[in-house]
Image (cartoon, rainbow, N blue to C red):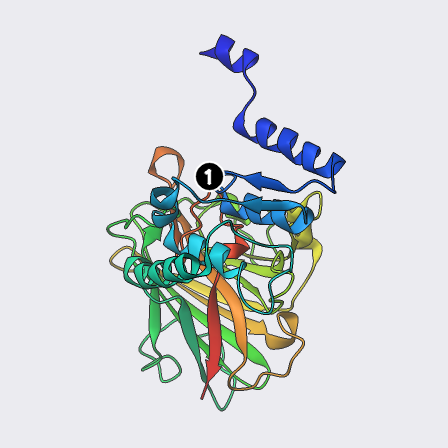
Amino acid sequence: MDDARRHFPRNRELQEARRNVMRRHPLTQFVCLHAADSEDLPYVSECMDSHPNMSVDIAARIGELGRQPRMARRFFGRCTGERIPPHWALRIDDLMRYAIVWLLAFTAALADGPNQIESKFAPRDSPADTDPNSSFWRGVPAIFAENDRGGIPVPGYRTEIRSRWTGGNLYFLFVCPYQQLNLKPGAKTEGETNELWKWDVAEVFIGSDFKNIRRYREFEISPRGEWVDLDIDLDAPRHEDGWVWNSGFKVSARIGPANVWYGFMQIPYSSVDRRAPTAGNVLRVNFFLSEGAGPHHKAIAWQPTRQPTFHVPEAFGTLKLVN
């Protein structure tokens, strides 16, 4: 097998070779069969954005698209509507295209559950509060992260997430079941901890830019109250270097009984959105839980990324500020 790998190019190498041909011949229209790469729709989207002379055909790939309904729905959505670049076109008649979009939207709703969390208005800010039954958090609607990155349910890790907002801040509460904690030795909470994601954390990825979805913020908290915040630019050579950015957010955490830990975040609203916080504002968001070490590690996602990473902005859901 090792010899074969040395003699045959990998899939991405072949994809990039095709991309180089399209780049060298901008006046030639290329129709890429089988959705170009139906197992990596974010990459296909990136290619189509970069190459106006590229279009795709989805023949014999309905099954692959159906296994990733949310990602496929977003991909098809890029091919219709006023916000779609004019060079985007699927080789499929309009009736069939709209039928597939409708079908994918319907099956996505059944497969992955709701893709919006409502953040409930609070008349005043709150001190650090990790109690789900407190006056601040009681009655606030919750969403749940309970699948792995591929959308497969992970029993025993149903993580509850609630959100509130005020005139200055955005709040999140995490209720995180665990089997075996993986904690960083020598925890320090007075300053941020770079590469905290190597240990157990709850994470919020959130952004307000619906045009450049590859820019957003990342906030993490550990069961012992360690934290890190990052300004993410996926087009930067090393987007992890965004940890030097500082949002001014505050955290609190505690490890409770019955193998559950609780995390609280207070995020300055101005750090994630240029608009003033107002009922009706919608943000792009995803939530994750990383728990356990080695073969026992679990990666839980609210909206499945269907990639070996959390950083798939095409998979984000939304957060809406409500009264």
**Can residue 298 be seen at all in this image of the molecule?**
no
Q: Residues within 10 Å of mark 1 (few under 14, many from 20)?
A: some
As rendered, which of 121 and 278 lies closer to the eye?
278
- Residue 209 percent location from the top left of the image: 63, 67
Name the side, left or right, on which 189 lies relative to 136: right
Residue type highlighted by circle 1: His
> For the point 56% across and 78% down, which residue is it?
169
Residue at coordinates 33% horizontally, 60% vertically from top-left? 103
Residue named by callout 1? 34
Residue occupying the point 27% across, 60% down: 257
> In the image as oriented, which residue stretches furthest toward the top?
3
Which quadrant, please, contains the C terminus?
bottom left
Q: Does 18 appear above or below 125?
A: above
Rendered location of residue 92, percent (x, y) = 46, 52
Snapshot quadrant of residue 86: bottom right
Q: 184 or 153, which is in the foreground?
A: 153
